[in-house]
Every structure is written in structure tokens, then in C-alpha cells.
Amino acid sequence: MNAIESFGVDKQYEGHIALHPIDMEIPEGSVFGLLGPNGAGKTTLLRIINQIISPDHGSVNFYGQKIRSSDSHQIGYLPEERGLYKKMKVGEQSMYFAQLKGLSRHEARKRLHWWFKKWGLETWWDKKVEELSKGMAQKIQFITTVLHEPKLLVFDEPFSGLDPINAALIRDEMLRIKKEGSTILLSTHRMESVEELCSHMALLNNGEKILDGSVNEIRESHRNGNFRLSYRSKNPITLSLPGEVIISQNITDFNKGICIAELQSTKLNSSEIISALAPQVDTIRFEEIIPSMNDIFIKSVKK
């Protein structure tokens, strides 16, 4: 089953097309990356899924049924524009958000104390939000987003403003939550996060979906026959290779006596190239260079 399905969802603001008709499927239990440059339509789509705004046309299904207002208790949303009230106390505000999502006061307090203890935030319960650092405020908002244990979690740039330690903390919690059965929709500009976390993705540009599917399948489909060869030699060797193989670079690390050559082949596979190289060099490593999500993002958007 899919957690979310959109059918021909579009949106226009005063003559500006923010989102062309989008068909999209987010598999249940996946971490789904929603990618795109600024102004691509990501936030508009996230707001439609969260029922903050309505599409002009089309519809959204939530776990096989047309989405309803009551489904909001099964969705957790962390928007890019953070929304804590600066003059309220941290604990008071956290309790307020938890009860908005349907938790009783007793259950909300119990779960919040568990999270605050886990992340060493107990001393901040009675302090005002304005006393929090940006990273601390982000952690509080993450807690209030996941506290009611929703079926779907929507994160819009969750790592923005976080140092590497806290970014890793949030990432590990997302993986744990996913392992426990929740579906995660992640909008981010950090392509390394997509490769670490996401099993599926969609790429938007100028309000249109230009790419979607399994992350592994997308990377495989963008293979371009590039290989990297590392071999022992004090000087680059003139490699004798079939005409289908082009040597784009051949350099030496003089300190280690290692040469690195980059090859490109449109026809031969790795085993055929290795067979041609074997009599010529003492190979240390031979690998195919699979394009990164960052490379695919830039190439697809420019195209």
C-alpha cells in the first residue's frame, strides 16, 4: 500500500503556476525524498498533503482513502519556517502542541518527559523559548512533531541550522521511527541525506515532476560508463585498451607510487576492461563511478 498518492494535483497563485498536475506515490514504510531547487513547488505540495491549502484540481489519498481533515492526527509536520512562540515556556508550549494532536494531558506529559530525559533537555522545561539556541529550538520542534507517533511524518529541511552532531542525532531518530513503521516524507537540499536515508524520491523543477522512483534504480539508470583504475607505478603507463574505451585522466601520486586513471566506456563492461588491463598493470582497485544524487540533481535540473 502507498501512504500517499496524489492524482493530478496542481496549484496556481494569481496567474503563477506553482505546481503543474502531479501524480506521485509514496510507499508505506519508506523514507521518500522530495527534491528540487528553490521555487520548484516542494513546499506547495507539502502544504497540500498537510491540508494547509487545497489544490486547484486533483486529489490526495492517505493510506488508500481520500484524505480527510481527521487524518491530521495521523500526520506530523515540521515546516521549514519554524513556529515556536518565543515568550512561552518550553514545557508549556510542548504540552500545547501535543494536545493539539489528540494526546491527553497525562499522556503528553509522560511522553515529553521521556524525550526530554533522552536528549538531556530536562533543565529547559521551565525556560522561555527565546532562551533556546537555534539548534535547541529545532530539537524541541522535532520532538513535538513526532510525539504523537503519527503514521506519516513530513519534514521540510529538518537539518537546516544544525551542527553535525545534532544533525546525526535527528537522522538516527528518523531511521528508528521509520524502522518502527512510520512513513517519512523528507524535503531537503542535502543530497548526502538523500543517499543515507531515502529509498524513493521525486525531483521537482518549475512546478513539474521531472524524475521519480527508487533511489537505487535512478542512480543505476544514470550510469555513464565511467570507471576509476588505481595501479602501482612510479610513472603513468600508456595503457593499451580497446577503441571503445577512452582514458580521460591518468595521474600519479609520486609519494606512494600509485597511478590513478579515469576511463570511459560506452560498450564494454567492467570485466571486459579488467581483462584488457590485467597483463599491463598491477591493479590495486578498479571501480565503476556511479553518479551521486548531487550529480543527478544538477544534471536533471539543468537539462
Image (cartoon, rainbow, N blue to C red):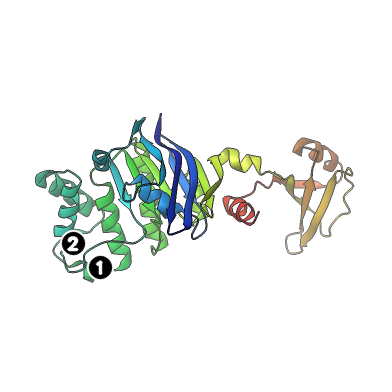
Q: Amino acid at mark 2?
A: Val
User: Looking at the figure, which quarter contains the N terminus?
Assistant: top left
- Which residue is nearer to you in this view: 203 or 190? 203
Residue lying at 81% horizontally and 39% vertically, measured from the top left: 267
Q: CA distance from mark 2 to mark 1?
A: 9 Å
Residue in the foreground of this view, choosing between 194 and 253: 194
* Tag 2 near tag 1, CB within 8 Å: yes
Q: Write down the quadrant of residue 83 in the picture.
A: bottom left
Q: Position of residue 16 (x, y in %)?
A: 47, 58
Q: Disc 2 designates what residue? A: 90
Tag count: 2
Q: Amino acid at mark 1?
A: Leu
Q: Residue at x 33, y 47 (%)?
A: 50
Q: Which residue is mark 1?
A: 132
From the top left corner, tell me how far across and down residue 90 is, in percent.
18, 61
Where does the image place residue 92, in percent across and percent down from the top left?
13, 58
